[in-house]
Amino acid sequence: APVTVKKICCIGAGYVGGPTCAVIALRCPHIQVTIVDLNQARIDAWNSADFAIPIYEPGLVDVVKQARGHNLFFSTDVDRAIQEADLIFVSVNTPTKKSGVGAGFAADLNYVESATRRIAAVATSSKIVVEKSTVPCRTAESMRTILEANSKAGCRFDILSNPEFLAEGTAIQDLFSPDRVLIGSLQTEEGKSACQSLAAVYANWVPKERILTVGLWSSELSKLAANAMLAQRISSINALSAICEATGANIDEVAHAVGRDSRVGPKFLRASVGFGGSCFQKDILNLVYLSESLHLPEVAAYWRQVVTMNEYQKRRFSKTVVDTLFNTITGKNIAVLGFAFKADTGDTRESPAITLVRDFLQERARVTIYDPQVEAAQIWLDLSEAMPNVPLEQIQKQVTLAPTALEASKNSEAVVIATEWNEFREIDWTAIYNTMEKPAFVFDGRMILNADELRKIGFKVTTIGRGE
Ligand code: NAD
Ligand code: UGA
């Protein structure tokens, strides 16, 4: 019979482990949830008296306030949490490998493996181990081999795959009412029974018909497939945006017309300066690597093109800025509004803004950045990593961080919208215009501004995907 889950441990207190397990705790008051991490500073932040939690995510702090100290705990005592739990989520990072075999493509599974080895080393009773991290197809098999080779007598481990589909900025909403919860298991008696135990946890708030149970490998592959197909939609619309700019068509109108076909659907067709975020590129490269390993070079090339198009879109946008500013931005002040990879997050991983700022600096422009959430230290770190050969002091001579959009725009020749923060729609554009050099240029990389209104003020406006 399926085990009734009473205690959950989540290894990894990041963007996925934190919100996911905080919501489980809130929705399942009868389950004790302990989220553990090796990073002491991160755990201290989750535990801070003033709820200065380490992630900016709308609604998250309220969830933590309601559950922390009741049935939700954050700790660095990984071993104890493993020992006490019936079910363990492995929610650690799986970045792209930086060196060795598959460098630049394959997922680095080192963190998943250490967490798995830790479970095997300290567990004194049977566990359901759940892959929450995004991993290559058949990782569950490796985890099972490690666990079985190192387990104590009488301990059995059932492995499940339960990939996470939340998007940053809407994580809490996504977790409260997911389109679906996907659970993969071996199709054995034990596998199915473990699957039912986890399904019963979700059934506390997710309608049964939204809980999909499939085989392990399908579950692992579905996660990579979902991200690849979402990113592919963006690259498709961005490819069309280049045609629009060259022809006078308008990508908003094209996307609307295409999206009205119920087979295509209207969502996720916003042309942009390029997609960012920690996962789309990583997961597609992972799929490319998988395809190559399986001797499917045409399949690999197909998915790789989604990333190539995204690189092109970013490059094309910075070139538009330079071309429009009379073919040189050397010594000019450019205000970049937004640095996060999307609105409503402080996360900058793979943010297109990083690439834009790097391109502008390489043209020897001066750049002023404003973002409502991203911390200064993070911006310096991202720019240093993007330009490993340039000392930080040099970068800091060319880049200024501003406390408001208006401050950032002062004396600039151009304002570039890199993130779709709502506040950029609402700022006083006349005030911005008055502080800028003339002619005053606006480059809307996110299609959020009313170009006609801005032109009335006097701006020269360039919007992605719109030919004049
Ligand atoms: P993250 O870097 O924010 O968090 C991972 C955490 O795991 C870190 O705090 C790290 O210290 C901790 N950790 C690593 N090894 C550990 C170990 N052995 N023991 C204890 N703690 C350990 O990463 P994230 O954004 O939460 O992503 C986690 C996984 O979820 C990745 O596989 C990612 O692809 C996937 N995912 C992410 C998102 C997202 O929106 N960020 C969405 C869906 C899936
Ligand atoms: C994405 C997926 O949407 C989640 O389902 C998935 O769980 C997650 O990746 C993951 O595996 O990490 P996320 O990256 O947080 O979530 O955010 P998205 O809303 O998907 O946006 C990704 C990027 O695409 C952002 O830079 C966004 O600005 C851009 N985007 C999105 C567009 O350019 N156009 C669109 O129409 C939509």
Image (tube, rainbow, N blue to C red):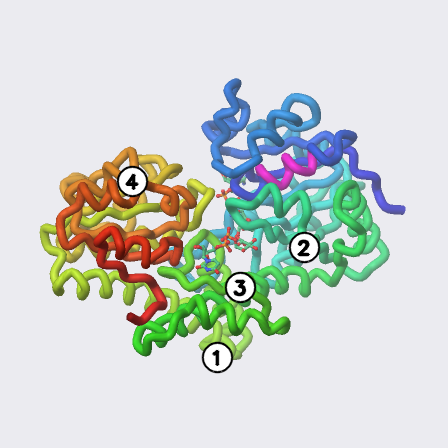
In the picture, the disc for residue 405 is 4
> Which sits earlier in the primary sequence, circle 3 or circle 1?
3
Using residue 419 as the reference point, say whether residue 325 is left or right of it: left
Please say if 265 is above or below 19.
Answer: below
Task: Answer whether residue 23 is magenta in the image.
Answer: yes
> Which sits earlier in the primary sequence, circle 3 or circle 2?
2
Q: Disc 3 vs disc 2: Cβ atoms closer than 8 Å?
A: no
**Badge 3 residue CB within 8 Å of ligand 2:** yes
- The nearer-to-camera label among 1 and 4 is 4
Please provide percent x and percent y for residue 156: 77, 45
Please provide percent x and percent y for residue 446: 38, 56
Tell which residue pokes out farthest to the bottom in this image.
Answer: 298
Viewer can see residue 117: no
Cα separation, mark 4 vs mark 3, equals 31 Å
Using residue 261 as the reference point, say whether residue 83 is left or right of it: right
> Which sits earlier in the primary sequence, circle 1 or circle 4?
1
Q: Amino acid at mark 1?
A: Pro
Q: Disc 1 vs disc 4: Cβ atoms closer than 8 Å?
A: no
Query: Disc 3 marks which residue?
Result: 230
Cα separation, mark 1 vs mark 4, equals 46 Å
Q: Amino acid at mark 4?
A: Ala
Residue 183 lies in what quarter of the image? bottom right
Q: Disc 3 vs disc 1: Cβ atoms closer than 8 Å?
A: no
